[in-house]
């Protein structure tokens, strides 16, 4: 039990502490249309299917970006390159970074689905919204990929409240793990 005697809150704290140990790529999900132009930094993005190409992203339900994404029906997932920490910080709404919805950080182009695409991203996926689900504090958006662009840079990673990049592994490491 935590100091308030709340077992659910205690489990949430334990869960959040454990999740900090999970490293993930950092993406900025963007949308533009009648409901407005928004972007938000997310750590939850994954492939759903390769054929047809589909992916999912999770966005806090109370974010204005979540309701705009649902109303606009299109979005782009911009997987940030290792040198785009400023973009991640800006769209996460970190204090002193200004309004995260002004698109001041990074250079942007319009993706085929009319969502802003980040120039220099490690990867960018332009999507049409297929499904939306609620899961606790987040909305889960599943999109059909209309365009997939692989950039040149390595992806930005986030774990234990720190940004980082892939470490270079020794050639024997893969063999030691049994993946040779």
Image (tube, grey):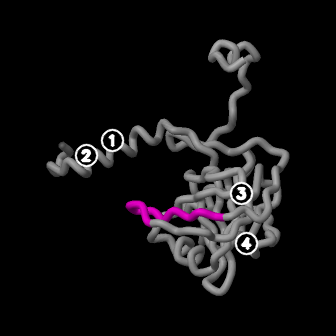
For marks 3 and 2, give the CA distance: 41 Å
| Image point (72%, 53%), residue name | 51
| Image point (14%, 49%), residue name | 5
Using the image, tell me which numbered label, if any, was put on residue 115. 4
Q: Earlier in the sequence, mark 4 or mark 2?
A: 2
Quarter containing the N terminus: top left
Count of labels in the image: 4
Which residue has dot 1 on it?
A: 14
Picture coordinates of residue 70, whole percent (x, y):
56, 76
Q: Is residue 69 left or right of residue 127?
A: left
For marks 2 and 1, give the CA distance: 6 Å
- Residue 162, located in which quarter of the rendered image? top right
Which residue has dot 3 on it?
A: 52
| Residue 108 within the magenta-colored segment of the rendering | no
Which tag is nearer the camera, tag 3 or tag 4? 3
Q: Earlier in the sequence, mark 3 or mark 4?
A: 3
């Amino acid at each position: 039990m935590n100091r308030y005697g709340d077992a659910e809150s205690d489990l949430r704290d334990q869960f959040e502490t454990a999740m900090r140990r999970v490293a993930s790529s950092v993406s900025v999900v963007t949308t533009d249309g009648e409901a407005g132009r928004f972007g938000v930094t997310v750590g939850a993005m994954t492939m759903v299917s390769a054929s047809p190409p589909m992916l999912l992203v999770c966005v806090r339900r109370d974010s204005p970006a979540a309701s705009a994404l649902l109303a606009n029906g299109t979005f782009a997932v911009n997987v940030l390159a290792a040198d785009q920490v400023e973009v991640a910080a800006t769209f996460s709404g970190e204090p002193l970074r200004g309004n995260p919805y002004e698109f001041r950080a990074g250079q942007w182009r319009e993706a085929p689905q009319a969502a802003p695409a980040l120039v220099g991203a490690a990867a960018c996926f332009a999507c049409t919204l297929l499904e939306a689900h609620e899961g606790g504090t987040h909305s889960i958006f599943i999109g059909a990929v209309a365009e997939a662009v692989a950039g040149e840079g390595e992806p930005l990673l986030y774990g234990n409240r720190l940004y980082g990049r892939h470490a270079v592994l020794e050639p024997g490491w893969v063999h030691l793990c049994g993946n040779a």
